[in-house]
Image: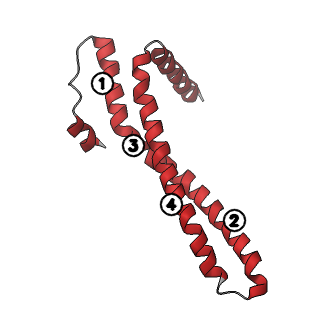
Amino acid sequence: MREVSRGLGDVGKAVDFLKARPRLWKWLVMPAIVTLLVLAGIVLGVVALVDPLVAWVAAHVPSWLETIVSWILRIVVILGVGMAAMVVFVGVAGMIAGPFNEMLSEAVEEELTGKAGPPFAIGAFLRDA
């Protein structure tokens, strides 16, 4: 339990450090925005595929059952996509945040040591991504 509280204390110190240096917030905000856009695109793509899937399955059941099956299948697909999105989110967020975290680390190091880090290179950033 002591390690958890120590870790939470470290998070608090990091937040205080970043609050005092607003120019570093871009390295936290950008991966969140990119992750949101990627996941929104994935969810919108799946939502676009739901109706054809539901229509195809509904066409294979008796007509008196079609409405019920359509609603049940729609709910199952939405819940499935939601749970899959939660499972995948951590991995996707980590992959997207990696290069931004590298840039944040370099900016913090520069702030603390006073030594300028390597200049930003889009090629290295994309390679890390």
Residue at 20% over, 24% down: 118
* 3 relative position to 117: left or right: right
Crowding at dot 4, Cα within 10 Å, few <14 / some 14-19 / many 20+, comes out as few
SS for callout 2: helix
- Looking at the picture, how far across and down is residue 59, in whole percent? 65, 84
Relative to residue 77, is residue 14 depicted above or below? Answer: above
Residue at 56% over, 58% down: 84
SS for callout 3: helix
Q: If you read the primary sequence from the N terminus, does the residue marked by circle 1 or circle 2 appear first?
A: 2
Type of amino acid at the residue the image marks with label 1: Glu
- The N terminus, quarter of image: top right
Q: Which mark is residue 45?
A: 4
Circle 1 sits on which residue?
106
- Looking at the picture, how far across and down is residue 27, in whole percent? 40, 28
* 84 relative position to 30: left or right: right
User: Which of 76 and 50 lies nearest the eye of the viewer?
Assistant: 50
* Cβ–Cβ under 8 Å for marks 3 and 4: no
Q: If you read the primary sequence from the N terminus, does the residue marked by circle 3 or circle 4 appear first?
A: 4
- The C terminus, quarter of image: top left
Q: Nearer the viewer, mark 3 or mark 2?
A: 2
Circle 3 sits on which residue?
96
Question: Which quadrant of the structure image shows residue 83?
Answer: bottom right
Q: Which mark is residue 19?
A: none
Crowding at dot 2, Cα within 10 Å, few <14 / some 14-19 / many 20+, comes out as few
Q: Nearer the viewer, mark 3 or mark 1?
A: 3
Circle 2 sits on which residue?
75
